[in-house]
């Protein structure tokens, strides 16, 4: 009889959805944590998830600690693996894993072949909204008689409320936090040792573990979100408060990307909250759209765009080096409250919600012309939910418009007035979001016009940018604004 194959367990595959009950090989390759400087909290979370999975599998697991994945694969001919979620890992298991059986990928709402078949039927320009509507129709989610409940597939226009006036927090209870255990203690000890002996370099603070790393913890985090925060998630999805780093967000991206929370499990819980009238439709739809819409979509774009996407895209000619304060998460000389709050939050937790990522950090990087490939690596390394597959479309495409419009039809940038409307940052900031010239000119307001001046040749044929470019050309003080922003090194 042939020997039963061992299931190779790789990063992003630490939950029961990747386990069919047989023997397993769990590889802890130090290169996963040492190839580039990563956030200390991220290294802790991913290593903790791996070791918790080893404990859960018990006698079924063969656990190896090696420097490189290659060491664990070379010479083995008894393995099978669910196709890994990154190009690098896929290449390694195919090259070094002799006779390894490759099973279809898991952990998403739609599979790769299905998306590829749908995408191939289009004109080459397709939208997330089309993908999302297709999935909703197929699954029957939030439909009545074949039509979307609420009249539209996206209720995003109902989910753009600014924070409550005068509030310092949303007033919600603290999210459910996991309890650290002996595994976390050992992880922290090992990371300290790696850092001391020069094996690894980390940035940021190893916060008390705030995210679920096991399926049981993920279920408790999901239950808490649905019961306590989902109702406020929708209206305040885009809002930011200086003293409320979680707002009403789910904090479930980490367990989903670790593979310990299946996205359908999260969607089902939200749909049940709508069915029982425990959460409003707009909040439930917005959450479903984040998970089955955008998260699924960027996963598929990672494979659909091919191996070269994310390696050299630079449609706006951005070649700026990431400054030291940015790379080291050092906000000590940052004066703009919005950027300082984001950098400090990222330093302390390794996590920010999507508006801080897109309209604060991403917006600053876009306006200042940071190299988009290096920026994508940075986002992957310093965010606890950062993965090779999630960041290219989000940063190269959505945030930096470096792909020339393959993901987004225009650059996602704004002046300071948007930040002022959607946050409490500007009231306590020395910069004025209405000013573009002078010592108190907002770096985002001034930076917006300086950015348009720099990239006008690349955007002049983009019809969605026609009006902003026309406004830019009419500014009498444009040269002064451009010169002023060329001198600015920190916000």
Image (cartoon, grey):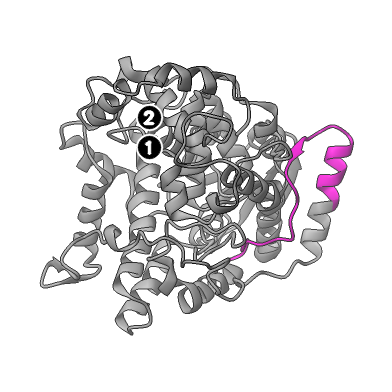
Circles 2 and 1, Cβ within 8 Å, touching? The answer is: yes
Q: Which residues are magenta?
A: 189-214
To which quarter of the image does residue 380 belong?
top right
Horizontal relation, residue 197 to residue 320: left or right: right
Q: What secondary structure is marked by label 2?
A: loop
Q: Is residue 1 visible?
A: no
As rendered, which of 362 and 426 lies closer to the eye? Answer: 426
- Residue 203 lies in the magenta-colored region: yes
Which mark's residue is nearer the viewer, 2 or 1? Answer: 1
Q: Is residue 39 visible?
A: yes
Residue 314's x, y, as percent? Answer: 42, 20
Q: What's the residue at 70%, 51% (across, down)? A: 348
Q: What's the residue at 61%, 73% (across, down)? A: 176
Q: Is residue 232 above or below residue 408?
A: below
Q: Residue furthest left?
A: 145
Residue 259's x, y, as percent? Answer: 53, 56
Q: What secondary structure is marked by label 1?
A: loop
Q: How many marks?
A: 2
Q: Is residue 11 above or below residue 463?
A: below
Secondary structure mostly taken by the magenta-highlighted segment of the chain: loop
As rendered, which of 463 and 14 lies closer to the eye? Answer: 463
Residue at numbered disc 2: 401
Residue 412: mark in rendering? 1
Q: Is residue 183 above or below residue 334?
A: below
């Amino acid at each position: 009889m042939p020997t039963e194959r061992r299931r190779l367990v790789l990063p992003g595959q630490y939950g029961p959805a990747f386990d069919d009950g047989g023997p397993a090989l769990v590889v802890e390759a130090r290169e996963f944590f040492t190839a580039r400087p990563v956030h200390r909290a991220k290294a802790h979370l991913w290593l903790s998830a791996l070791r918790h999975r080893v404990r859960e599998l018990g006698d079924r697991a063969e656990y190896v600690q090696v420097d490189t994945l290659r060491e664990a694969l070379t010479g083995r001919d008894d393995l099978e693996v669910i196709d890994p979620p990154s190009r690098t890992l896929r290449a390694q298991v195919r090259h070094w894993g002799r006779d390894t059986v490759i099973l279809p990928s898991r952990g998403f709402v739609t599979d790769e072949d299905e998306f590829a078949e749908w995408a191939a039927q289009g004109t080459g320009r397709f939208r997330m909204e089309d993908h999302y509507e297709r999935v909703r129709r197929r699954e029957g989610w939030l439909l009545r008689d074949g039509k979307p409940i609420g009249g539209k597939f996206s209720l995003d226009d109902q989910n753009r409320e600014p924070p409550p006036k005068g509030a310092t927090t949303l007033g919600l209870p603290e999210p459910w936090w996991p309890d650290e255990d002996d595994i976390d203690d050992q992880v922290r000890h090992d990371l300290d040792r790696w850092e001391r002996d020069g094996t690894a370099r980390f940035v940021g603070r190893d916060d008390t573990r705030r995210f679920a790393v096991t399926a049981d913890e993920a279920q408790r985090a999901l239950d808490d979100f649905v019961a306590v925060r989902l109702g406020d998630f929708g209206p305040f999805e885009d809002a930011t408060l200086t003293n409320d780093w979680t707002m009403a967000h789910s904090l479930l991206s980490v367990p989903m990307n670790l593979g310990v929370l299946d996205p359908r499990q999260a969607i089902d819980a939200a749909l049940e909250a709508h069915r029982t009238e425990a959460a409003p439709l707009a909040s439930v739809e917005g959450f479903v759209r984040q998970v089955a819409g955008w998260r699924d979509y960027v996963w598929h774009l990672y494979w659909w765009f091919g191996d070269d996407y994310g390696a050299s895209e630079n449609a706006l000619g951005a070649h700026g080096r990431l400054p030291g304060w940015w790379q080291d998460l050092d906000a000590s000389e940052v004066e703009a409250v919005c950027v300082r709050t984001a950098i400090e939050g990222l330093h302390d937790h390794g996590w920010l919600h999507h508006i801080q990522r897109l309209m604060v950090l991403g917006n600053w990087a876009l306006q200042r012309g940071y190299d988009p490939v290096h920026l994508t690596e940075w986002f992957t390394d310093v965010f606890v939910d950062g993965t090779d597959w999630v960041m290219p479309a989000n940063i190269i495409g959505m945030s930096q418009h470096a792909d020339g419009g393959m993901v987004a039809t225009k650059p996602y940038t704004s002046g300071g007035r948007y930040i002022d409307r959607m946050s409490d940052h500007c009231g306590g900031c020395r910069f004025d979001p209405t000013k573009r010239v002078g010592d108190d000119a907002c770096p985002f307001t001034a930076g917006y016009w300086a950015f348009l001046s720099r990239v006008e040749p690349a955007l002049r044929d983009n019809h969605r940018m026609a009006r902003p470019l026309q406004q830019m050309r009419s500014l009498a003080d444009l040269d002064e604004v451009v010169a002023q922003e060329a001198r600015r090194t920190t916000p």
